[in-house]
C-alpha cells in the first residue's frame, strides 16, 4: 500500500475573533511542538484571523489554510480573497466545496472547479470537500452522488504530484451532529473516491492523493478512521476548536 502522509486538518469555520484565534493558535503551537512521523497538521481559521494565526504558528509544524477563495486574480469582487492574497498571508492550503458553502451560499460544482484550478495554478493545495445529505444517503445513491461531485469539481485539474490536491469526504448528516459515519462507511466512500481519482488522474497519482474523512471526527474515533486503507486523515470541525482535543487527534493518528 502506498505510504501516504496522514493529514489532520482543522476547519475553525466562523469561530474565533482575533484574540480568541491568538489564544487557540498559541495553545496549538504549545501542544504540538512536533508532530508524529507520517502525520501533517493543518489549521484553517476564518480569513480575518489568517495573518495573526500565521504569526503565532510559524515556528510550529502546523500548516495554514483558508476556508474560501475566489478564482479571479483581483478587482471588483467585494468580500472575496484571491489565491495570491491567501499565499501572501502564509496559506498553503484552502478548503473548497464545503457543504456549508454549497448549501448556504449556493456554490455549484462549477464554482468548485474554477476554485480548484485557480488554487493549483497558484501553487496552493485545494482541500476539496464532497458528501451527501441524509436524504441521498437514505436513497442509497450516496456513492454515485459523491463520485459525481469529485468528477465535476476536479475535472481537468492539472496536477503532476499527488500532494497538489486533497479530497475530504464529509457526509452532511455527520457534520456537527455527533453522528459519525462508521469507519466502514468512511472507507466505502473514500475507496470509491480513490477509484474515481484513478480514472481521472491515473493510478500512480491517485495512490498518493490524500482522501480525508470529516463529520464529528474526534479523539475517540480518529484511530479507527485512519486505520482504514483509504482514509488518510480527517477534516475536523468542532474538535479543532479545542487545542487539547485537536492535538490528541494528531497524536492518536500517528500511533
Ligand atoms: P464537525 O467535526 O464539527 O462535525 O465538522 C466537520 C466539518 O464540517 C469539517 O469541515
Image (spheres, rainbow, N blue to C red):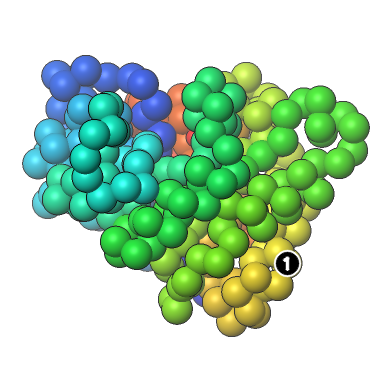
Q: Residues within 10 Å of mark 1 (few under 14, many from 20)?
A: some
Query: Toward the viewer: 155 or 123?
Result: 155
Left/right of residue 206 with respect to residue 189 in the rendered view: left
> Does residue 19 sit above or below 164 in this rendering?
above
Instruction: Locate residue 205, reporting x and y percent.
Output: 55, 77
Determine which residue is flagged by label 1: 195
The residue at the point 66 percent across, 57 percent down is: 151
Instruction: Locate residue 50, reporting x and y percent.
Output: 20, 36
The residue at the point 69 percent across, 26 percent down is: 173
Left/right of residue 215 with respect to residue 44 in the rendered view: right
Indicate the quadrant where residue 199 lies: bottom right
Instruction: Locate residue 233, reporting x and y percent.
Output: 52, 52
Query: Toward the viewer: 53 or 23?
Result: 53
Most extreme residue toward the right is 139
The residue at the point 46 percent across, 73 percent down is: 159
Q: How many marks?
A: 1
Is residue 113 something one can see in this rendering?
yes
Query: Toward the viewer: 43 or 150?
Result: 150
In which quadrant of the rendered image does the N terminus lie? bottom right
Is residue 86 something one can see in this rendering?
no
Q: Is mark 1 within 8 Å of ligand 1?
A: no
Indicate the quadrant where residue 211 lies: bottom right
The residue at the point 80 percent across, 48 percent down is: 143
SS type, badge 1 = helix
Instruction: Locate residue 37, reporting x and y percent.
Output: 37, 65
Left/right of residue 40 with respect to residue 170 in the rendered view: left
Amino acid at each position: 500500500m502506498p505510504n501516504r502522509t496522514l493529514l489532520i486538518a482543522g476547519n475553525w469555520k466562523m469561530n474565533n475573533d482575533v484574540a480568541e484565534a491568538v489564544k487557540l493558535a498559541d495553545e496549538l503551537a504549545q501542544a504540538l511542538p512536533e508532530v508524529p512521523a507520517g502525520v501533517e497538521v493543518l489549521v484553517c481559521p476564518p480569513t480575518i484571523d489568517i495573518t495573526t494565526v500565521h504569526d503565532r504558528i510559524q515556528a510550529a509544524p502546523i500548516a495554514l489554510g483558508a476556508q474560501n477563495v475566489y478564482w479571479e486574480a483581483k478587482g471588483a469582487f467585494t468580500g472575496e480573497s484571491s489565491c495570491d492574497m491567501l499565499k501572501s498571508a502564509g496559506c498553503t492550503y484552502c478548503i473548497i466545496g464545503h457543504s456549508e458553502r454549497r448549501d448556504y451560499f449556493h456554490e455549484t460544482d462549477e464554482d468548485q472547479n474554477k476554485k480548484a484550478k485557480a488554487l493549483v495554478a497558484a501553487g496552493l493545495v485545494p482541500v476539496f470537500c464532497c458528501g451527501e445529505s441524509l436524504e441521498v444517503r437514505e436513497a442509497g445513491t450516496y456513492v454515485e452522488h459523491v463520485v459525481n461531485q469529485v468528477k465535476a469539481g476536479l475535472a481537468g485539474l492539472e496536477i503532476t504530484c499527488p500532494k497538489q490536491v486533497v479530497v475530504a469526504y464529509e457526509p452532511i448528516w455527520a457534520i456537527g451532529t455527533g453522528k459519525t459515519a462508521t469507519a466502514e462507511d468512511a472507507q466505502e466512500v473514500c475507496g470509491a473516491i480513490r477509484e474515481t481519482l484513478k480514472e481521472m488522474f491515473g493510478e500512480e497519482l491517485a495512490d498518493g492523493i490524500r482522501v480525508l474523512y470529516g463529520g464529528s471526527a474526534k479523539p475517540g474515533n480518529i484511530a479507527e478512521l485512519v486505520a482504514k486503507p483509504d482514509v488518510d486523515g480527517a477534516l475536523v470541525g468542532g474538535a479543532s476548536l479545542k487545542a487539547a482535543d485537536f492535538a490528541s487527534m494528531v497524536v492518536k493518528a500517528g500511533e
